[in-house]
Image: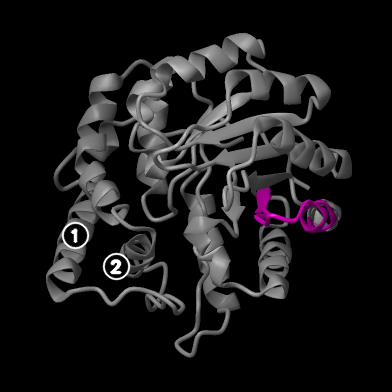
Amino acid sequence: MATLEIDGVLPVIPTPFTRDGGLDWVALDGLLEFAISARVCGVVLPAYASEFYKLRDAERRELVFQAISILNGRLPVVAQVNHVSTAYVAETARDLERAGAAAISVAVPRVFGLPERDLLRYFDRILQAITVPLVIQDFNPGGATVSVEFVKSLHGQHAHFQYLKLEEPMMSGKVQSILEATHGAVGIIDGWGGTYMLELIDAGICGVMPGLAVSDLLQIIWQNARAGNKDVAYELFRGVLPQITFSLQNLEFFHHAEKALLVARGVLSHAEVRDATLTIHEIDRAHIDFLNRKVIDLVNGQKIGVHTAVYPQRS
C-alpha cells in the first residue's frame, strides 16, 4: 500500500462508463495511467466528481478495489465513502483499508443540519474503525463549514484525522487558524477545482483536489507557486481557470465538461455521463469545446511556455 503524503494535487478520478451505462474497467486503467503521468501525489474515488451518488454500493467498492489493483502501489488511493449512516461508513472504510486504501475520505453529512457535537460523534466512530488517515470533506454552499474548534477537538481525540478539504471562498484566515490550532498536524486541501489555490498556497494549504483533466497543469502551477515563482504560476493558471470556473457552474455540467476534456486529450474514448444528468445546450457544448481547446494549447505550450515551468520530480 502506498502511503499518503499530500503535497500538491490529489485529483478525483471520474467514473468511466460504457456507452450502455456500465462501468468501463479498461478506461479506468487509462485514467489512472494519466494520473501517474501527471505526477500528482495520489488519487481519490469515488467522490462527487466521480458521480458516486449514481453508483450502486457494490460499484463504489469495486472502483476502489480496481484502482488499488491497477496502481499496485505506484500512487496512493484515497477511498471516498459518503453516506449518512455512520455504521455503513465505518464498515465500508474498514474493508477498503484492508484492501489497500492509503486513506479514507468522508464528506460531512449535510442532508439535514447536525450540530457539531453530533458530527463529532459521527466521525469519532469512523475514526475508531480505521487506522489510515482520514480526510474530511466539508462542502456546504451558503452555509457554515466545520469550525476551528471542531477540527482541533477531533484531531485531539484521533491523531489520524490528518486532512480537511474545504470548498469555500475567502478562507485564507480559516486555513491559518486551523494550522495554528493543530500545530500544522491537520493539512487543509483546497477543493472546488482549485479555483482559489494561488492565494491559499500563501495561506499554507497542503494540496488541491480538482478534477483529473487539468491535474497535470495544476501540479505545475503548484510547484511553481510553492517555489516562489508566482508570476510563472499565474500565467499558466489564468489560462486554465476559465475552463475550471465554467465547468463548475453546476456539478452535472462539470461531469460533461471534464469527460469532454479527457476525450480531447486522448485519455477517454467517449464522454459518457450516467443518467440522471443534464442535457447540455448546443451553445454551452460549443463553449466547453472552445475552452478545452485552450487547455490543450496550454498543454502543448502554444500559448504559454510550459517548458519554462518547474516540473515536479517523483522519486
Which percent across, then down, holds residue 297? 19, 52
Give the side of residue 165 with respect to residue 261, left or right: right
In the depicted structure, whether residue 278 falls above or below residue 129: below
Residue at coordinates 45% horizontally, 79% vertically from top-left?
Answer: 275
Which numbered tag is attached to residue 264? 2
**In the picture, residue 280 is in which quadrant?**
bottom left
Give the side of residue 266 with respect to residue 301, left or right: right
Instruction: Please state which amino acid type lies under the numbered disc 2.
Output: Ala
Q: Nearer the viewer, residue 153 or 213?
A: 153
Start-end of magenta stretch = 76-92
Residue at coordinates 41% horizontally, 34% vertically from top-left?
Answer: 168
Which numbered tag is attached to residue 311? none
Q: How is the image coloured?
A: one colour
- The residue labelled by disc 1 is 293
Q: Residues within 10 Å of mark 1 (few under 14, many from 20)?
A: some
Which percent across, then down, holds residue 64? 69, 62
Which percent across, then down, holds residue 209? 49, 42
Q: CA distance from mark 2 to mark 1?
A: 8 Å
Q: Nearer the viewer, residue 123 or 286?
A: 123
Q: Nearer the viewer, residue 131 or 5?
A: 131
